[in-house]
Amino acid sequence: MKKSVLVVASLGLTGALMLTGCGKSDDVLVVGTNASFPPFEYVGGASGDEIMGFDIDLAKQIAKDAGKTLKVENMNFDSLIVALNAGKVDFIASGMTITPERQASVDFSEPYYEATQMVLVNKDNNSINSLDDLKGKHIAVQLGSTGDIMAKSYSQQVTAFNSGFEAVMELKNAKVDLVLFDSEPAISFLEKNPQLKMVELDFSPEFYGFAVAKDKVELLNSINSSLSIMKQNGGYDALVNKHMK
């Protein structure tokens, strides 16, 4: 797949200095994520329990631009919007695709990454070559993800897991026919599981955004401003080169 990044419209620096969040302190900005979506968010580092990734680095810069400290809350993907609207986190950075259904509940930043869905299968599986071949297959997905939503349009046999790792393990154990997953995480899982292969099908592109509650207009403007500044000063491209294969 050809990976592409998006230019974010400039909104100026002023908005980045006006962030107000729901952290326990005015100096803290709380981001919700699901750290099982490499390279966007995952657990690693020298300590083995640090939450890292492309989204996390972007979120750190957003907080820095606002003169705040970032606090990361790791939770199940399908709990993120609930936590956001309950005021438990200030924004979501979790490779979340902008969809009309989600836009009914939250507001999104300008798109910051273009992706698509990919299929992972065991190497000896040559039965999937088109979207029609997905019909009737047993599909593993991450709960609440775009793949979870899309899979139901192809098959009634869809098993959803809290993490992509669990879905991949189910595939490796031959309990499902395929995993439907976002492209970059699929590549990341493929590198660690050489017995699998990736199949590119004619899925439509999708776009990731950071999500905020509907009444957080200043926060949304500040996030967009930080993204724009990073794009202009080369910081965004540096993070793409750091995290993406």
Image (cartoon, rainbow, N blue to C red):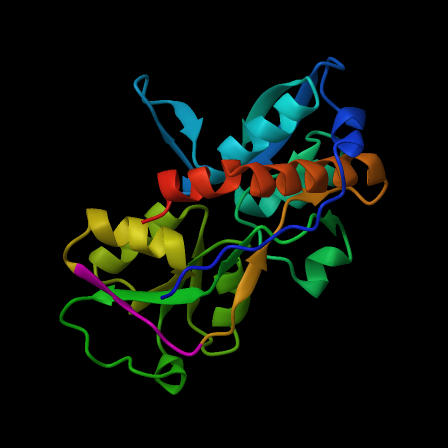
Of 234 and 144, the residue lying toward us: 234
Is residue 197 inside the magenta stretch?
Answer: yes
Q: Report x, y in % for residue 219.
A: 77, 35
The residue at 82%/45% (across/down) is 214
The quarter of the picture where residue 86 lies is top right
Q: How many marks?
A: 0
Residue furthest toward the front? Answer: 233
Q: Percent from the top left, x then y, of residue 151?
A: 47, 70
Q: Is residue 19 left or right of residue 99?
A: right
Report if residue 122 is visible in the image: yes
Left or right: residue 107 versus residue 209 is right
On the image, the x and y values in percent for residue 110 come to 68, 51
Q: Nearer the viewer, residue 227 or 229?
A: 229
Residue 238 pos. (x, y %): 43, 38
Q: Quadrant of residue 64?
A: top right
Task: Identify the image quadrant of residue 12.
Answer: top right
Q: Does the image show residue 40?
A: no
**Residue drawn at (44%, 67%) of the image:** 158
Residue 201 left/right relative to 15? left
Q: From what the image shows, is residue 13 above or below residue 189?
A: above
Residue 215 covered by magenta stretch? no
Magenta residues, start to end:
196-202
Which residue is at the front of the view, 6 or 174?
6
Which quarter of the rendering shows the N terminus? Answer: bottom left
Query: Is 10 drawn above or below residue 90 in the view shown?
Result: below
